[in-house]
Image: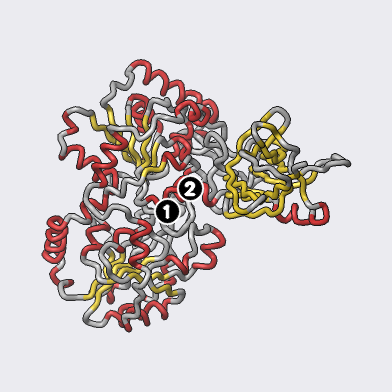
Amino acid sequence: MAHCSIAEISWERVHLTLTVDVTGDVSPSQFLIADGDRELPVKSRRIAAGRYALEINVTNFHGRGQVPNGTWRIVPVVRGEQLPAADFDLTDTDRLDADSRTFLYDRNRVAYVIAFGISDNDENPEFLMRTYQLFRKAPVVPGQGPKKPLARRIGLRVLPRPRRRKLANQFYRLARRLNPPRGNRILFASEMRPKIGGNLARVNERMIERGLDKKYSLRYSFRIPDTANKWNTLRVIYLLATSDVVLMDDYFGLLGQLGVSPKTKIIQLWHAGSGFKAVGYSRFGRYGSPKLTNAHRKYTYVITGSKHLVPTYAEAFGIEESAVIPTGLPRIDTFLDKERTEKVVEDFFTAHPKLEGKRIILFAPTFRGKSIGDAHYDYDRIDFAKLYEACGDKSVVLFRMHHFISDPVPIPAEYSDRLLDFASFPDTNDLLQVTDVLITDYSSVIYEYSLLDRPILFYAYDKDRYSVVRGFHRDYDTVAPGKICVTFDELLSALQNEDYDISKLEQFRQENVDYVDTNSADRVIDWLVLGDPSDTGRTERQAWLEPVTDDTAVGDQPLSDQSEV
């Protein structure tokens, strides 16, 4: 008789792999997880004779949702017939506690638990996978509660969050009923940028170049948390309700609060390539973890720069791989435009003639913190005096901090002829064109810059801490296409001695950029905005299109961040 047993349990971020041994002259065609009458299929692959790997993304298991709460058994299926559930080596059950996982999120108020155990069947104890969520209310400490909002402090009545959410959805439905989409309304929107830029700007520009603005109504909504208020929130809801296609390039928390119509095509033109740091559900249960119901789940399509990155994006956004389309990044179109590049370089040195002939070093790291609300960089990690001395008369350093960081670079006035703050420069990609050496850390700026075949230095002073707290998609030391410096003195030495490592640049480009051309915006427009790669899965999406039930308020800054790759 056939026998099924769990041999190994392993984890990689939110991916659970159960290695199953099947004895007897059978080859299962399928595996299920079963809890009473509930049965759900599991992805599996044969890895050896009688051995199978069951692969479960616990945050994105079925219908863009986590493994449902339950006590699940592993059941093999042979020729349509279910075999007895898998068991486990009873002499090795101490492993089960060690292999169990608890994912904390929402300020540690919610726990999603995957616990392994054995059933209480004396004759045939079965392997169990218990999944459940635990919730607790936020503690109230007398005298230490949060400061009351201004409106409440001055005596104005403030609606509770569930009521605001309900009203927002009522307004959405009313707007859609009174002014339904007409098949020609396209909304460009961001909740993290005050104006259009990056991938959104290029797609918008290309649509106008092709005359599509004559056929389609192009609409715009751009704001940041500091400029959000109830009036422009109502405007955003109205635009979302009455548009046919919505294009965005960053985390859009308002989506998570609305029961968005499945007829609205939502296209995420994520502003970054998949950098080293984990994002979204790839860091579930870690610092800045998303909730299990999240705006990212609402995307119809997400673009990426290469087929290689499709699984990474699907994991990060909690969506199926078929919804991740490797169109290439539209902003690379202008970056690779030779005529435009020549003019960019010419205009730059016309505006900054003292920099011509210098070695231009661009210092462009990502931010630390969860999101725009607490974004910062540790400027104490920069010795401006030493950096100034290292520049000599032949080099200058341009500082271009992440746009989330509001604090200016504290460059001493006496060093301002060699160390310059370029925060106000319009376009980072244009700066890359005049850059001879790039200094960064975990930023996606490396994707465009790698196309120029110029050296990159990685100043990753907090690499080990960053790996533990935020997590990486891939091994940083292995993948980084340049020399890694963990101290400022190492960085200065590499600059002074031109000690670069470009040996991994070519492989990095091949893995992360499928299209080295100027047609990415056209692919987005033709494949996604005007076309539709696949019309399947619409019914399955109905469940996750419903509004969330957590306590994030409409218009509020999300407690968790998925805003930067």
Quarter of the image with the N terminus in it: top right
Label 1 element class: loop
Label 2 element class: helix
Answer with left or right where residue 563 lies relative to residue 435.
right
Residue 102, label in figure:
none
Residue found 34% across the figure and 72% down from its top: 502
Q: Is residue 510 visible?
A: yes
Which residue matches tag 1? 565
Q: Nearer the viewer, residue 367 or 41?
A: 41
Residue 316, label in figure:
2
Q: Say how many tags the image has.
A: 2
Q: Residues within 10 Å of mark 2 (few under 14, many from 20)?
A: many
* Residue 442 position within the rendered picture, expressed as x and y whole percent measured from the top left: 42, 62
Residue found 61% across the figure and 44% down from its top: 145
* Residue 415 position within the rendered picture, expressed as x and y whole percent measured from the top left: 28, 75
Query: Which amino acid is tagged 2?
Result: Ala
Quarter of the image where one finds residue 300: top left
Mark 2 and mark 1 in contact (Cβ < 8 Å)? yes
Q: Nearer the viewer, residue 385 or 529?
A: 529
Residue found 40% across the figure and 31% down from its top: 230
Nearer the observer, disc 1 or disc 2?
Answer: 2
Quick one: label 1 or label 2, which is nearer the N terminus?
2
Quarter of the image where one finds residue 524: top left
Q: Nearer the viewer, residue 560 or 531?
A: 531
* Residue 242 position within the rendered picture, expressed as x and y whole percent measured from the top left: 33, 24
Quarter of the image where one finds residue 465: bottom right
Q: Is residue 164 visible?
A: no
Answer with left or right where residue 278 lies relative to residue 264.
right
Q: Nearer the viewer, residue 117 or 392?
A: 117
Residue found 72% across the figure and 49% down from its top: 6
Query: Which amino acid is tagged 1?
Result: Val
